[in-house]
Image (cartoon, rainbow, N blue to C red):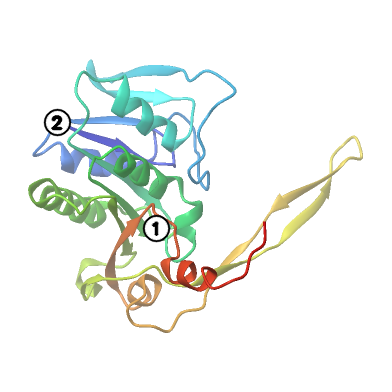
Amino acid sequence: MIVLCNDDGFQAAGIRSIYKELAKFSEVVIVAPETEQSAMGHAITLTQPLKVRKIEEDNEFIGYAINGTPADCIKLATTVLFEQPPEMVVSGINQGGNLGTCAIYSGTVSAATEATIEGIPAIAVSLNSFDNSDFGFSAEFGARLAKIVLKNGLPDGVSLNVNIPAVSYSEIKGVSITRQGKSRVIETFDKRIDPRKNTYYWYAGEMRIDEVDEEADCFQVSNNYISITPIHFDLTSYKAMDELKNWDIPL
């Protein structure tokens, strides 16, 4: 069984598109947030109960909608919702790329990471556009890759962050194995006043890509290649460890 998650919400077009493709070769159950949880990162819910709502469409069970984060969904899917843990987790298809440091903020990527923590192979799939909602090819490619991962497995602790250019099939040049690129957010906030004269701010940041290395995910996607980045939840900088061991740090 494949568990399908995302951060755009249970009703998002991307998750429904890849559901249809995965269902052609595997049992698939959606376990996803009932509302959009974009940019939630790896947040988990500790201070309120998680409500699980069983979803049927056309008299057929398709999954569970949960009032929590993507990571919450995967925790429930791997522990209590099923008699056996899923064989695999697919997260997506996300509306918008998860390139560079976006991967840190992404609930879609975090759902795949949570599965990996639980020892389950996982991929996160994103379409690099916030406007183009044609998920046809992305769904087909994501399903093909999922089938390969089911057959071959993944290295311990590794999930795949997949980003697909939002162009026609004929314009895609190929598939590249990439590293996480460098990007930064230009932080801006719209300052506004509510009817009671209280000040509030609405986030309006913009992601900028600062990357010219051809091995980087953002470089390859901008050149119409699908990027597949193997990522790991171990955030340790081993190079920095060696340097810090030479510091004289007193008690």
Of residues 187 and 234, the one drawn nearer to the viewer in this rendering: 234
Numbered label attached to residue 132: 1
Quarter of the figure with the N terminus: top left
Which sits earlier in the primary sequence, circle 1 or circle 2?
2
Q: Residue at x 17, y 36 (%)?
A: 87
Distance between mark 1 and mark 2 Cα atoms: 28 Å
Q: Secondary structure at mark 2?
A: loop
Q: Position of residue 177 (x, y in %)?
A: 24, 70
Q: Nearer the viewer, residue 197 or 162?
A: 162
Number of labels in the image equals 2
Q: Residue furthest front?
A: 251
Q: Amino acid at mark 1?
A: Asn
Above or below: residue 27 compared with residue 122: above
For the residue carrying disc 1, how many other residues have a C-alpha within 10 Å: few (<14), some (14-19), or many (20+)?
A: few
Q: Secondary structure at mark 1?
A: loop
Q: Nearer the viewer, mark 1 or mark 2?
A: 2
Q: Is residue 185 left or right of residue 3?
A: right
Furthest residue toward right: 197
- Which class describes the residues within 10 Å of circle 2: few (<14), some (14-19), or many (20+)? few
